[in-house]
């Protein structure tokens, strides 16, 4: 495969690094020969971009995935640094078969790379989880294709709060080299069979149909990327699309909050943790250790808090810090559900060590409904008993007064007399009845 074919293919990489790759090729296309010896002389040291295999520390294989990822090593890798996904898969298989290795760390510092080869390596990593514990530690950058691979491990961590994670997406570009050829007095005419064979040729401007063809390929590759991340993390594709896969790069705690990684830990702490998890029959994280069913003559060693603190103070300190941070976040989330009148309830829930924000919201809602029901009942009990109202009846006028209009004084007197005879009738109602009867 030619370098141009690689560059024009889909990349799961930070866009800025893809531009660097194109700049290298553009220089090469203009006739500039890339002299690796001259590059080494200019920087004063060998490029030394040969891919490294794993090293073993306390039974843990540390497998580096650094620089730009490509299926095979090539000139771009020699200049920019990088690794072959094929060679990395070979190193991973060797570590799985190595009896001196009980766990594996993928040590990643990469902006991503070509899509070609990435899915195969990620699938190899995921299958390795069933053979030996395998975790990812990102130190610097774990973007795009690098995250595709890193997320396939049992768990992924970052080394510090400045590590960049994410850039889930796919990018490519189309380069029209016809003007460059024309400047050299060259014109290439392509002859092909099949509608889509050269629909996006680099020897002419990109057509609308050619652009759509490229977009269709990218959209399909992007769907594979999203599906793989969802499977690796054990979440839905909708969650990945909503919270992770819009191409953003998350830094430090942002990556933890988004669910891309599970926490922060140093390499030495992670090595110690893998060794501790191997001894502990009950691991706090799925996939990191498995309960042994083998019986021994030595009996079972119980792992206590005191034993961990005495033998692994760094791990104990890390667990305490992680636990304190989680508890603080829980307390703050419960406190955010408070409304006036329920402060005592919120204080109880904050410090019970188990209630979540959802639990607090339900408890406050229930308490508020109960309080309002009691208030309504009290208001009803204190209300005065309404007086019975007699039905209005017409009062026939006295025969002596028939056809005569009553004076205001007469109306007043008759209304008061009517009220006396009909308790509960208001003065206005009595006046109305008298006037109707006149």
Image (cartoon, grey):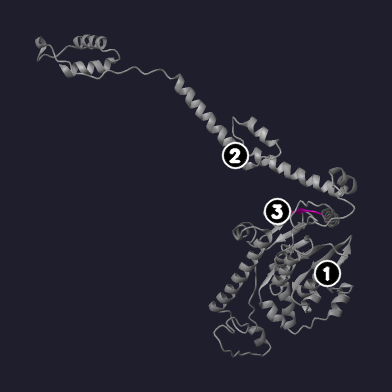
- Per the image, label 3 sits on a secondary structure element best described as helix
Q: Which residues are magenta?
A: 262-266
Specify the label residue 254 is tagged with: 3
- Looking at the image, tell me whether mark 2 or mark 1 is earlier in sequence order: 1
Residue found 65% across the figure and 59% down from its top: 244
**Quadrant of the rendering where the N terminus is positioned:** bottom right
How far from the left and from the top, in percent, is residue 217?
A: 60, 74
Left or right relative to 130: residue 396: left
Q: Nearer the viewer, mark 3 or mark 2?
A: 2
Q: Are marks 2 and 1 in contact (CB under 8 Å)?
A: no
Q: Nearer the viewer, mark 2 or mark 1?
A: 1
Q: Nearer the viewer, mark 1 or mark 3?
A: 1
Of 180 and 50, which appears nearest the observer?
50
Residue found 50% across the figure and 29% down from its top: 373
- Which residue carries the number 2 mark? 361
Of 295 and 438, which appears nearest the observer?
295
Specify the label residue 97 is tagged with: 1
**Quadrant of the rendering where the C terminus is positioned:** top left
- Looking at the image, tell me whether mark 3 or mark 2 is earlier in sequence order: 3
- Per the image, label 2 sits on a secondary structure element best described as helix
How far from the left and from the top, in percent, is residue 343?
A: 63, 31
Residue found 53% across the figure and 33% down from its top: 369
How far from the left and from the top, in percent, is residue 12?
A: 68, 69
Q: Residues within 10 Å of mark 3 (few under 14, many from 20)?
A: some
Q: CA distance from mark 3 to mark 2?
A: 26 Å
In this rendering, is residue 194 above or below 373? below
Specify the label residue 279 is tagged with: none
How far from the left and from the top, in percent, is residue 202?
A: 63, 82
**Residue 265: within the magenta?**
yes
């Amino acid at each position: 495969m030619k370098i141009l074919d690689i560059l024009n293919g889909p990349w799961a990489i930070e866009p800025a690094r893809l531009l660097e790759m194109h700049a290298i090729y553009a220089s090469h296309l203009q006739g500039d020969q890339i002299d690796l010896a001259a590059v080494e002389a200019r920087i004063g040291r060998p490029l030394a971009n040969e891919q490294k295999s794993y090293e073993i520390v306390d039974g843990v294989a540390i497998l580096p995935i650094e620089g730009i990822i490509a299926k095979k090593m090539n000139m771009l890798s020699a200049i920019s640094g990088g690794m072959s996904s094929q060679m990395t898969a070979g190193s991973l298989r060797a570590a799985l078969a190595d009896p001196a290795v009980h766990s594996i760390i993928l040590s990643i510092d990469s902006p991503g790379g070509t899509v070609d080869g990435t899915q195969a390596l990620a699938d190899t990593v995921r299958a390795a989880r069933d053979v030996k514990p395998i975790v990812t530690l990102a130190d610097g950058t774990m973007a795009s294709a690098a995250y595709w691979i890193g997320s396939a491990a049992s768990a992924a961590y970052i080394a510090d709060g400045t590590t960049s994670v994410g850039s889930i997406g796919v990018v490519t570009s189309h380069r029209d080299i016809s003007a460059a050829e024309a400047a050299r007095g060259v014109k290439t005419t392509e002859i092909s069979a099949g509608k889509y064979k050269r629909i996006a040729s680099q020897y002419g401007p990109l057509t609308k149909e050619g652009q759509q063809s490229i977009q269709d390929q990218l959209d399909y590759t992007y769907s594979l990327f999203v599906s793989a991340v969802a499977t690796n993390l054990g979440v839905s594709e909708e969650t990945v699309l909503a919270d992770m896969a819009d191409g953003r790069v998350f830094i430090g705690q942002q990556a933890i909050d988004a669910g891309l990684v599970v926490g922060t830990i140093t390499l030495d702490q992670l090595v110690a943790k893998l060794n501790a998890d191997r001894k502990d029959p009950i691991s706090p994280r799925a996939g990191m250790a498995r309960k042994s069913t083998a019986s021994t003559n030595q009996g079972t060693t119980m792992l206590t808090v005191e034993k961990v603190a005495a033998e692994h103070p760094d791990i104990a300190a890390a667990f305490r810090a992680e636990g304190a941070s989680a508890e603080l976040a829980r307390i703050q989330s419960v406190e955010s559900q408070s409304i006036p009148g329920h402060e005592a309830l919120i204080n109880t829930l904050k410090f019970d060590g188990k209630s979540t924000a959802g639990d607090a919201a339900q408890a406050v809602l229930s308490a508020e409904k109960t309080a309002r029901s009691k208030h309504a009942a009290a208001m009803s009990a204190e209300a005065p008993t309404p007086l019975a109202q007699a039905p209005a009846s017409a009062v026939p006028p006295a025969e002596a007064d028939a056809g005569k209009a009553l004076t205001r004084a007469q109306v007043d007197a008759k209304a008061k007399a009517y009220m006396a005879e009909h308790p509960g009738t208001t003065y206005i109602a009595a006046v109305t009845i008298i006037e109707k009867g006149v």
